[in-house]
Amino acid sequence: MTLSAQEIERLHALPLFGGLSSGSVADLLRDASVRMLEKRRTLFVQGDRATHFFVVLSGWVKLYRLRSDGAEVVVEIFGPGESLAEGAMHMPGGYPVSAEMVETGRLLAVPTQSFGERVRQNPDLAISMLASMAMRLKGFVNRIEKAETQTAAQRVADFLLKFSPPADPGATGVVVQLPYDKQLIANRLGMKPETFSRALATLKKQGVHVGGPKAEIRNIAALRRFTAPE
């Protein structure tokens, strides 16, 4: 397993490993392996036995479920420095969702069996795991609240702000590199494509212009005020 200094730093920043020493993290991950996976590669399918959980080192991974009519519902999308499916190791029914690469990327695959044994032996790790799951639950609750209180345009603006880089000194605006294509963003936000298009049209009045894989936010402070539910 070969990791860059930046990737190691991301691992230590994960809530899952919060408060653990570098030696403890290295011991926990000694059975892990780095995988280079191409776009649209399936990681696992809903109902599969949970043999691994993953840390995204680069690229994007989507978790999704299929409705009875075959339509895909995106549950969440994870990017660099985020972990996914660690809770599935405790689920007798296996993975509750399916996972697929949104783009080519590197993942750290951690075997659940050996990791679970270490969790049972290490109370600090067990507490960190509970904290990580609590943060994930809080994120889902926040998403549900925003879906109920924000307009479609506000939710798209909120999404753009999440991926905005720090503004240059003295600048009021930024350029955002969209992490994945617009159709997937719409799905992730629970919108139909036409609703997403109308939201982008509304945001033009707020100084947001989307072209290709980039979005220009001309006044980031004003856009933050716009996202606040009335």
Image (cartoon, helix red, strand yellow):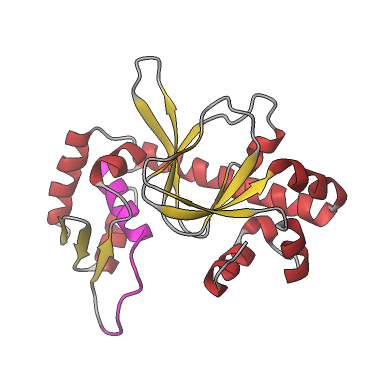
Residue at 27% x, 63% y: name it. Answer: 176
User: Which region shows up in magenta?
Assistant: 151-170
Q: Is residue 14 visible?
A: yes
> For the view shown, which residue lies furthest in the bottom direction?
169
114 vs 185, left or right, is right
Q: Nearer the viewer, residue 79 or 44?
A: 44
Picture quadrant of residue 79:
bottom left
183 vs 116, left or right, is left
Residue 103, x across and y down, in percent: 36, 49
Residue at 69% x, 60% y: name it. Answer: 17
Q: Nearer the viewer, residue 161 or 12?
A: 12
Residue 174, x across and y down, in percent: 25, 70
> For the view shown, which residue lies furthest in the right direction?
121
Residue 194, x across and y down, in percent: 17, 35
Residue at 26% x, 61% y: name it. Answer: 223
Residue at 22% x, 56% y: name it. Answer: 213
Asked if residue 168 is among those painted magenta in the image, a careful observer would answer: yes
Asked if residue 22 is among those painted magenta in the image, a careful observer would answer: no
Q: Is residue 151 visible?
A: no
Above or below residue 164? Residue 133 is above
Q: Nearer the viewer, residue 20 or 106?
A: 106
For the N terminus, the quadrant is: bottom right
Residue 13, x across and y down, in percent: 60, 65
Report the label total.
Answer: 0
